[in-house]
Each structure stands twice: as C-alpha cells, then as structure tokens.
Amino acid sequence: MMNTYFVQKPKMTLAGVSIRTTNEVEIGPDGGLSRLWETYFQSNIAGQMDTVKPEYIYALYTDYESDASGAYTVVIGHEVAGERHLADSGIVSAAVPESKYMVFTTKKGPVFEVVSQAWGEIWTYFKGSTEIRTYTGDFEIYDSRNFDPANTQVEIYIAIE
C-alpha cells in the first residue's frame, strides 16, 4: 500500500487542456491521455496565464458521469486565480470544490508506470474501504522543479466524504 494522509483543501480553479474519456478507453489502444500530455507540453500553457504556483502541474479528473467506471473529463494544467474564460485560446477552466482528500503518494519510478499502478491500487482500496469517494474532483500533482519522467513521485488527491 502507498503512503497516505488526509488533508482539507479550499476551492481552486485549474486551467489547461482537456479531454473526455473513460478508464476502459484508456487501457486500450485508443487512449487519449498520453496525447493530452503531449498537447500540454507543446502548448506552453503556463506562459499563457497567471498561475498561482507555476511549478505545479495538475492532472484533474472531474465531471464524473458516475464513478470510476463511467466517463470523466481530464484537465492538465495549472491553478489560476479565480474563474478564467479562455475558450478562444483552447484553454479550459475547471472549478475544484473545497473538499477533504485522501492523498496517495506513489513510489518513485517511470511516471506512466507508477501513476498507472497507483490508480489500480486506489480503485482496489476504495472497493473495500470505509472512506467514500465523492467524485467531485480528484487530481495528481507533478512538481516540475524536479520532474524526471524516468524517476518521479506523484501525489494523487482523492476527494472523500
């Protein structure tokens, strides 16, 4: 089991690039998350807006259709001050409500491997846990100051009741 802790976080607004997908699509050959990351890195999004902490890259999972088995939206970007309307630039914004989170810290390793493994453990954990997911907005935080795709550690925040 990964290291975990609990934290209360205030409402925040994230802005970036997004796609709508499902876990079923992502485990197959048509998954779009890797292309979304490519779009994020090619677009210089952080340079196009006033970010709160530009060193933190967020991958937000929001607008859940139901639970982990339904469709959801992923936004990769940064925290911004207040609501942003950037539709003309291809940048979208998403409000993340104030919530209590259970934070899972991955082991160190290749980014896609450790994040994928962590989500598998998270889904298994919540099948039998006393904590209940709210599906209001879960996110991963990547610290770009020391980001090494071959050896990284990520925190995954899961909103709970």
Image (cartoon, rainbow, N blue to C red):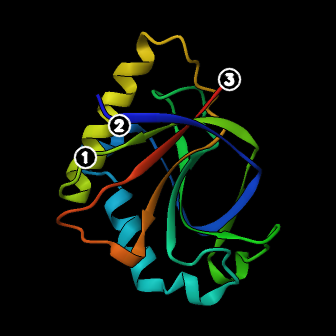
Q: Quadrant of the N terminus?
A: top left
Kindly state the secondary structure of the residue where label 2 is placed: helix
**Rendering coords of residue 21 (x, y %):** 46, 46
Q: Position of residue 79 (x, y in %)?
A: 65, 67
Gap between marks 3 and 1, in whole Å? 26 Å
Between 7 and 129, the one nearer to me in the picture: 7
Give amino acid for label 3.
Glu
Q: Quadrant of the C terminus?
A: top right
Residue at point 45% right, 75% down? 40
Q: Nearer the viewer, residue 141 or 39?
A: 141
Compute the Cα span from label 2 to label 1: 12 Å
Position of 44 compared to 24: left or right?
Answer: right
* 10 Å crowding of disc 1: few (<14), some (14-19), many (20+): many
Give the secondary structure at mark 3.
Answer: loop
* Pointer 1 residue: 107
Please tell me which of labels 3 and 1 falls first in the chain: 1
Under mark 1, the amino acid is Lys
Q: Residue at x 38, y 29 (%)?
A: 122
Eye-nearest disc, 2 or 1: 1
Q: Residue at x 52, y 37 (%)?
A: 71
Numbered label attached to residue 161: 3
**Mark number displayed over residue 145:** none
Q: Is residue 126 left or right of residue 79?
A: left
Q: Residue furthest bottom?
A: 47
- Quarter-of-image position of residue 159: top right
Which residue is found at the position 71% from the left and 38% from the top? 99
Horizontal relation, residue 114 to residue 66: left or right: left
Residue 91 coordinates in the image, percent (x, y) = 63, 74
First in sequence: mark 2 vs mark 1: 1
**Rendered view: 150 above or below 31:** below
CA distance for labels 2 and 3: 19 Å
Residue receiving disc 2: 119
